[in-house]
Image (tube, rainbow, N blue to C red):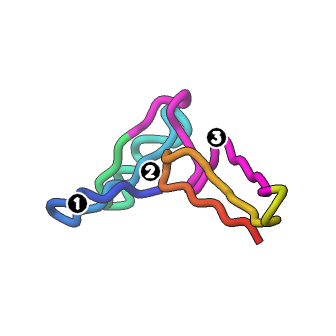
Amino acid sequence: MPSTDPRTGETTLVVPEGRFDRKILDGTGYTWREMPLSEARLGGEGKWVAISRDPKTRMLHAASHNRNNSDTGAF
């Protein structure tokens, strides 16, 4: 997934470290950087999600971590 600098609007292609030949990455013409595999995440990936139901109102509530702009919904 690309990362975007909020000040300039410029994007940088972020790739898992060691997965792509650097000549190929350079050949794309895009700005790129490698990220250690331990930090690599898929866009929208969740680490945890919780859903609960209020026993009196039967309303559902959902929550997730704030990494990678995660979001949850309960219906």
* Rendered image: mark on residue 47: 3
**What's the distance in space between the residues labelled 2 and 1, CA to CA?**
27 Å
Magenta run includes residue 43: yes
Q: Identity of the amino acid at label 2?
A: Ile
The residue tagged 1 is 6
Question: Foreground: 75 or 31?
Answer: 75
Write down the region rendered in magenta.
34-54
Left or right of residue 11: residue 64: right
Say which of marks 3 and 1 sits in front. 3
Q: Which mark is residue 24?
A: 2
SS of the residue under disc 1: loop
Q: Which residue is at 64% across, 40% downward?
A: 47
Q: Secondary structure at mark 2?
A: helix
The residue at 53%/38% (across/down) is 40
Q: Quadrant of the C terminus?
A: bottom right
Q: Quadrant of residue 54?
A: bottom right
Give the residue type at disc 1.
Answer: Pro
Asked whether the beta carbons under mark 3 and mark 1 sit within 8 Å of each other, the answer is no
Check residue 73 in the rendering and tell me which mark sits there, or answer none: none
Look at label 3 and name its amino acid: Lys
Q: Nearer the viewer, mark 2 or mark 3?
A: 3
**Who's the residue at 30% across and 61% down the image?**
11
Question: Looking at the image, is mark 3 or mark 1 earlier in the sequence?
Answer: 1
Disc 2/disc 3 C-alpha distance (Å): 31 Å
Residue 28 at x, y = what percent? 38, 60
Query: Going by the picture, which residue comes out furthest to the front?
Result: 56
Within the image, what quadrant is residue 19 found in? top right
